[in-house]
Amino acid sequence: MSLAGDDLKTGRTDPDRRLFSADGVRTGMSMFAARLRGGDLGAVPAVLGIAVIWLVFQILNPVFLSSENLGNLTMQCAAIGTIALGVVLVLLVGEIDLSVGSVSGLAAALLAVTFVQLQWPLVFALVAALAAGCLVGLLYGYLFTRFGLPSFVITLAGLLGFLGLQLWVLGETGSIGIPFDTWLVQFAQQLYLPAWASYAVAVLAVAAYAWSLLRRARRRAAASLVSQSYTQIALRSAALLVFLVVAAWYLNLHRGVGVMFVFFLMLVVVANFALTRTRWGRSVYAVGGSVEAARRAGIRVERIYLSVFALCSTLAAVGGILAAARLASANQSSGTGDVNLNAIAAAVIGGTSLFGGRGSAYAALIGVIVIQSISSGLTLMNLDSSVQFMVTGVVLVLAVIVDSISRRARAANGRA
């Protein structure tokens, strides 16, 4: 029977036939291999790095991959990962924010002072801390777009200035405890999903993922563009479902899946949706790829810079709040030490290009897992923190080398 007759019986259109193509899996694998050969490595090096790191530490200490240690590792990822998510946004437009640690510490100090000392309602204290973070980002964006100051200089000044402001806000006490019985501290320390809820979240997440892929595939097929087949979508969704269910089951062997970590994952998913499914997200990648080309295409470049800096500082404030809630205190060391460097390193290690225009929200998730895995593994081995800094530095250099090599490969491929 002719294809037209098949269409009358099945109701499938030409785009539907492409989606049902038996060659979908082979085509998808070929496209993936072509991207790798063209230098578009994405998060592949970081994922491979996680596998190697976990294997090495598990051999050195069998406790590393226990459900208890992995559960603690996920909770440790939330605060730094949230800050790293903001750094990813700034890196995508080819800029940098060196003050995310100071901004997170300032937000923690404001939360503690307004809630504990001034006796504000917790909700108002949270809004004040987040508003301060947003205002910092708007200030950076204004200075950058209005006077053309390099983001490196602006945020370096912010690192020093807001660290001083944090110390001034805390005052002579230097440390302010947050009551353990507040819902914020319980959220960060003691709140875990019931087993059934963790499995339900996994199923709902995969359903939303499959629906998103299906919609995108149908739109591309209708436009006669290369798209994923139903087979590819089904296989990817099934693989993700198996991974999430097994991960939830394994974490449930101890305390379960922390709600704070789920909150961080939700932020990553929302950021990824905004970057890949909205006009704003496409503009961010366009500005990171070429500012002049984006401006000629009618994109309001100044607004993109302003929004990205504001979101970065706001997410830094959220990360500072989460860190203070997990420690149940804010003090002079909040946001200092390795917080700033780990957040930036996580964004780069996760696959975000330092040159702009390349990366995804999931880079923050993957990168912070690498950072915290190194920290957890070395702690279990009772090694000094100096070793952690050196190992993290080596991993960061390797990530930048991979980014540079892939960039050259993409440029050579483009010239060819």
Image: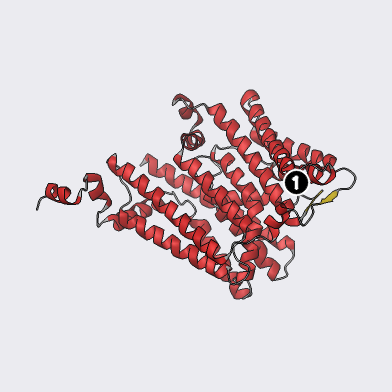
Instruction: Estimate the x, y position of residue 354 in percent, counting from the top left.
Output: 56, 43
Residue closer to the observer: 274 or 81: 274
Identified at 13% across, 46% down, the residue is: 4
Q: Report the number of discs.
A: 1
Instruction: Estimate the x, y position of residue 19 in percent, counting from the top left.
Output: 28, 51
Return the residue found at the far right: 172
Instruction: Estimate the x, y position of residue 265 in percent, counting from the top left.
Output: 56, 53
Q: Is residue 135 above or below residue 340?
A: above
- Give the SS element for disc 1: helix
Asked if residue 400 shows in the view, the reply is no
- Left or right position of 173 against 2: right
Residue closer to the observer: 410 or 271: 271
Identified at 34% across, 56% down, the residue is: 232
Identified at 54% across, 50% down, the residue is: 363
Q: Residue 29 sits in which quadrant?
A: bottom left
- Left or right position of 189 against 33: right
Q: Residue 69 sits in which quadrant?
A: bottom right
Colour setting: secondary structure
Q: Quadrant of the C terminus?
A: top left
Asked if residue 13 shows in the view, the reply is yes
Residue closer to the observer: 192 or 267: 192
Q: Residues within 10 Å of mark 1 (few under 14, many from 20)?
A: many
Residue closer to the observer: 295 or 110: 110
Instruction: Estimate the x, y position of residue 299 in percent, counting from the top left.
Output: 48, 27
Q: Which residue is mark 1?
A: 108
Amino acid under disc 1 = Ala
Return the residue found at the far left: 1
Q: Residue 15 sits in which quadrant?
A: top left
Q: Is residue 142 above or below residue 221?
A: above
Identified at 69% across, 70% down, the residue is: 380
